[in-house]
Image (cartoon, grey):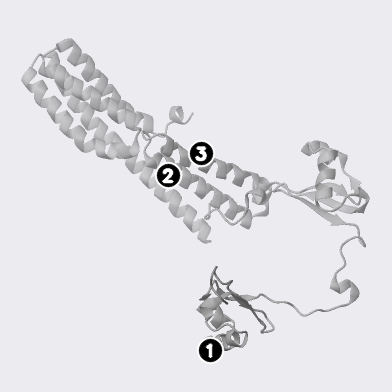
Amino acid sequence: MRGILIVTITTLSIVVLGISSIVYLDKTATGLALLLEETLQAVQEEDWGRAEAMISNSLERWEMVQRFWSAMINHKEVDEIRTALERSKEYVASQEKAAALAELAVAKLLVEHVPEKERPSWSNIL
Amino acid sequence: MRVMGKRQVGEMQPYELVIAVLIAELAAIPMEDTDIPLFNGLVPIVVLLAVQIGLSELALFSERARTVVCGTPSILISQGEIVEDELRKLRVNLNDLLEQLRNKNFPNVKDVAYAILETNGQLSVIPKSGLGPLTADDINLHPPSGGLPINLILDGVVNERNLQLAGLALDDLVAHTKKRGIEDLSQVFFANVDETGYIHLQAKMPKAGEER
């Protein structure tokens, strides 16, 4: 009986923890991707002032998010996102449109890929 | 591993062995690669542990589940005859069977009534009647039960709980050790008491340069 209780509590805790982490990843990734999308638009319109403000916002948001992401996802992915964001910041600061657009697109893709990869879908399981 | 139970590796069911190997492998992953969070190793370990406990609980309550999870024992020798079909089915060759029988002190197959390959891979051998070891009952003897001895002193440290369990007072123990020429309980290496009340004592060896 004690064994069944342990198994039930453990299974429920893991399910709850798993669902919460997926929801958190999804929510934070969507927020960050939205910021990066707005930065992309600002760069497209060559509104460099707005683009700089947006990329700074993205980096600030990333600093908050990455502490929890590091506990859940592979640190290599965290490092890749950080690198892409830092590169984007420099490209935006030096107003290099093509490079900034490419790097921001990469950062956005990497951010959106994380919750997709963690989701319990058939493609991920198989 | 302790949560999984007290069975030794050689006595594990096949699924338990697989889970033990998987857990060891999973525990090594976050240690080998610092890029992988500790949770990525811990969560599957906990899941496997839960699966193991769940399966063993299931096997405890349901015989059908036990059959599915652990399998069924196979009779390799029945009424003194080797069951060829079973040997072939289990891919056990005659040499392996004979070796196992010899390990169990049965050098001759004709002495064996039944040999059963248990689900944990161990071979149980039942000798033919009259060929088993002689027991006290066979010759109508009824020796007194030795009972379970209770340890009282281990390496000079008195176990108060066991002393109480044995219905002895500390003073009784001190008096007993003095009678045996040991002045201090801390000088007793090992002491236990059996069901008849006999206290077995062993004094500590004197250290080099020390006189007894």
Q: Chain of mark 2?
A: B
Residue position marked by numbered label 2 in the rendering: B42
Q: Are marks 1 and 2 on the same chain?
A: yes
Q: Residue sitting at 71 percent across and 48 percent down?
A: B119
Give me the disc on residue B171.
1
Number of on-image labels? 3
Residue position marked by numbered label 3 in the rendering: B25
| Secondary structure under the numbered disc 1 in the rendered image | helix
Tell me which corner region of the image, top left, top right, bottom left or bottom right, holds residue A70: top left
The residue lying furthest to the front in this view is B209
Mark 1 or mark 3, which is nearer the start of the sequence? Answer: 3
Mark 1 neighbour density, 10 Å: few (under 14) some (14–19) many (20 or more) = few
- Residue A82, given in percent of the width and then of the height, sits at 24, 27
In the rendered structure, which amino acid carries the disc numbered 2? Leu
- Residue B208, given in percent of the width and then of the height, sits at 55, 68
Can residue B167 be seen here? no
Can residue B166 be seen here? yes
Q: Are marks 3 and 2 on the same chain?
A: yes
Tell me which corner region of the image, top left, top right, bottom left or bottom right, holds residue A117: top left
